[in-house]
Amino acid sequence: MPRYIEGDFLPPKGRFAICVARFNAFITEELVKGAVDSLVRHGVADSDIDVYRCPGTYELPGLTRRVTESQGYVGVVTLGAVIRGGTPHFDYVAGECSKGIGSVAFSAAALAKPVSVTFGVLTCDTVEQAIDRAGVKAGNKGADAAMACLEMVNLYAKMVEGKRG
């Protein structure tokens, strides 16, 4: 019979970082509130959460890499909002952001002390879609990214410790 190893939502030992873009702050600040609330509700102390703000979503991968490489965190949640406009700017920013954060997440998982990096960047066609995903109709995607981060932190810990669940 196979063994199933997965993370859980127990509060882990360690600190969390939230890297958030200030651009579209009326959306991203709601995502931050959702992420912090989720972590705190699952036993992470407020004092174990740091929020880093950068100018925009394009800058998130670089910030996330620096924060991850500091090895001061067990988990890093990335948050931003890219809303389609009338130019191809959306495609460049959204694409580079997702590729960059994906690359950081891949590298961070392979560190001697693995760091979970999750993606909570909204890529929406309209402002209304972004508002809905920041807590109005479709839940709060910041909270979802924080929960995924918490689960992955605990999964990585089980793998490092050799625990099987």
Image (cartoon, helix red, strand yellow):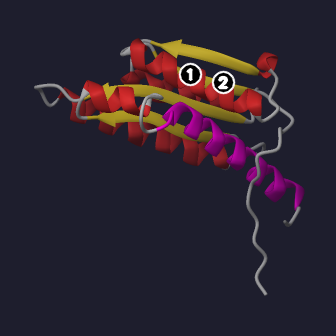
Task: Please provide percent x and percent y for residue 89.
Answer: 19, 27
Instruction: Look at the picture and state if 113 lies above or below 34.
Output: below
Q: Amino acid at mark 1?
A: Val
Discs 1, 2 touching: Cβ within 8 Å: yes
- Magenta stretch contains residue 161: yes
> What residue is shown with label 2?
36
Where residue 75 sits, quadrant-wise, is top right
Examine the image and state in which quarter residue 3 appears. Answer: bottom right
Q: Which label was assigned to residue 14?
A: none
Q: Is residue 50 left or right of residue 154?
A: left
| Marks 1/2: CA–CA distance | 6 Å
User: Residue 73 at what x, y percent from top left?
Assistant: 74, 30
Segment tinted magenta in the rendering: 139-162
**Residue at image mark 1:** 32
In the picture shown, does residue 82 fall above or below 106? above
Observer able to see residue 39: yes
Q: Classify residue 67 by image quadrant.
A: top right
87 vs 140, nearest the viewer: 140
